[in-house]
């Protein structure tokens, strides 16, 4: 079986695209053993559509200038299956015009209640819609998600999230080297070591709050205000200092950004901190890193419980260490040891369904 994946030529520069391809490259040989021939391609030449399955990555699609011509061409070509891989880092922003054409619409994370996609959400995300309705927060440039026809919801499927990428100490260097040398030698995140759970910093939360969308930045602003009242610094620091701080922190707070899942989540798991994060119960993803009070401590979206949870958590750190241990064990299960086989099985199941 021949699978062609359309990606930007410089896909390694973009974290979501790189994170999408990372486990494919890592498990490439196992997938190939099953008779699957995968090609990464970077243009819309006709020969690139000669395959059994075509996967179109969203950033590649967004770079196409004449989208209407491209969509019309997709209607005409004879391919067994066309899959759109939406690698945007939020559960929202379904691209309706392509959903109607493809056989499957993959997303790295989706809303558990798919019926939410039949509604229009302020800001294009469920959480931005929440802050608009609850606190009347408005964006200067208002956006609304386009409601999806309920008959098309079955096309929306979870593929895998960015957590399978590399978030180790030297991840950025390895990513840069891979972009230069294109060697699989740098696609290796299976050598993490378990860090000590003895920490000397209570809370870390180094976050960017300079977003041009008020509904996106609102949550971060409110978290920063609460932490400032508790004399906790939130200004960004160098990556070296940041990783050192996370390694030595008992609790690390990871708000939503443009999306719900954040690279910081995985850096916390690796370094043995306890993740505190706005509630993820309404989100479905694979692997599932977010099990309330087992792999992270959930915070209400309105943050009404935030300050109290900080106090309670700090007073019960010894009991709550189990959360860090459980989260790290779960993370290493999907990124080390048999992780190549686990992903290969996932990939094969997705393309066959």
Image: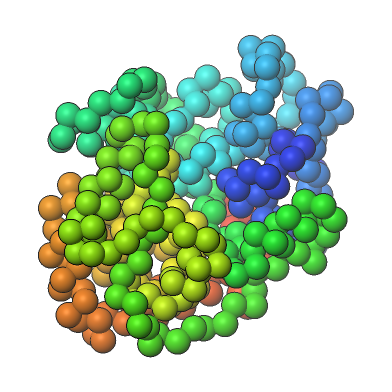
On-image quarter of the C terminus = top right
From this view, report whether residue 21 is shown above or below residue 83: below
The spot of residue 299 in percent (x, y) is: 23, 58
Q: Residue at x 55, y 67 (%)?
A: 240
Q: Is residue 136 visible?
A: yes
- From the viewer's side, name the closer residue of 345 and 91: 91
Q: Nearer the viewer, residue 245 or 42?
A: 245
Q: Is residue 100 above or below residue 168?
A: above
Q: Is residue 155 left or right of residue 34?
A: left
Quarter residue 298 falls in? bottom left
Residue found at x 61% / y 26%:
62
Left or right of 239 in this view: 257: left
Question: What residue do we see at 75% from left, 24% from top?
Answer: 78
> Can residue 331 be seen at all in this image of the molecule?
no
The residue closer to the viewer here, 300 or 73, is: 300
The x, y position of residue 162, in whole percent, is 54, 54
Left or right, 168 with reference to 265:
right
Q: Is residue 279 above or below residue 245?
A: above
Q: Where residue 116 sits in the image (x, y, percent)? A: 30, 34
Give the color scheme: rainbow, by chain, secondary structure or one colour.
rainbow
Q: How many marks?
A: 0
User: Which is nearer the eye, 49 or 170?
Assistant: 170
Q: Residue at x 16, y 34 (%)?
A: 135
Q: Residue 114, located in which quarter of the rendered image?
A: top left
Q: Relative to 56, does residue 262 appear above or below in the rendering? A: below
């Amino acid at each position: 079986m021949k699978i062609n994946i359309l990606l930007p030529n410089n896909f390694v520069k973009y974290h979501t695209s790189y994170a999408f391809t990372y486990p494919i490259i890592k498990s490439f040989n196992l997938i190939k053993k099953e008779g699957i021939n995968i090609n990464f391609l970077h243009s819309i030449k006709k020969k690139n559509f000669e395959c059994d399955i075509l996967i179109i990555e969203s950033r590649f699609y967004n770079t196409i200038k004449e989208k209407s011509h491209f969509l019309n061409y997709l209607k005409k070509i004879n391919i067994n299956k066309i899959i759109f891989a939406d690698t945007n880092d939020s559960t929202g922003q379904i691209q309706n015009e392509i959903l109607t054409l493809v056989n499957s619409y993959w997303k790295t994370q989706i809303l558990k209640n798919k019926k939410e996609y039949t509604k229009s959400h302020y800001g294009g995300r469920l959480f931005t819609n929440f802050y608009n309705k609850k606190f009347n927060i408005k964006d200067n440039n208002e956006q609304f998600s386009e409601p999806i026809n309920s008959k098309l919801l079955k096309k929306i499927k979870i593929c895998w999230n960015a957590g399978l990428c590399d978030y180790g100490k030297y991840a950025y260097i390895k990513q840069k080297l891979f972009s230069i040398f294109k060697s699989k030698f740098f696609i290796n995140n299976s050598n993490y070591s378990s860090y000590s759970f003895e920490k000397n910093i209570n809370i870390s939360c180094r976050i960017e709050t300079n977003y041009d969308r008020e509904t996106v930045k609102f949550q971060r602003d409110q978290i920063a205000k609460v932490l400032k009242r508790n004399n906790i610094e939130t200004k960004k620091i160098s990556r070296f200092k940041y990783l050192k701080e996370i390694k030595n922190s008992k609790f690390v707070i990871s708000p939503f950004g443009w999306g719900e899942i954040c690279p910081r989540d995985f850096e916390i798991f690796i370094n043995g901190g306890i993740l505190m994060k706005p509630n993820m119960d309404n989100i479905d993803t694979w692997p599932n890193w977010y099990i309330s009070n087992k792999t992270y401590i959930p915070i209400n979206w309105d943050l009404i419980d935030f300050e109290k949870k900080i106090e309670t958590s700090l007073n019960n750190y010894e009991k709550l260490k189990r959360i860090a241990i459980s989260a790290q064990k779960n993370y290493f299960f999907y990124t080390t040891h048999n992780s190549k086989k686990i992903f290969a099985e996932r990939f094969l199941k997705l393309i066959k369904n």
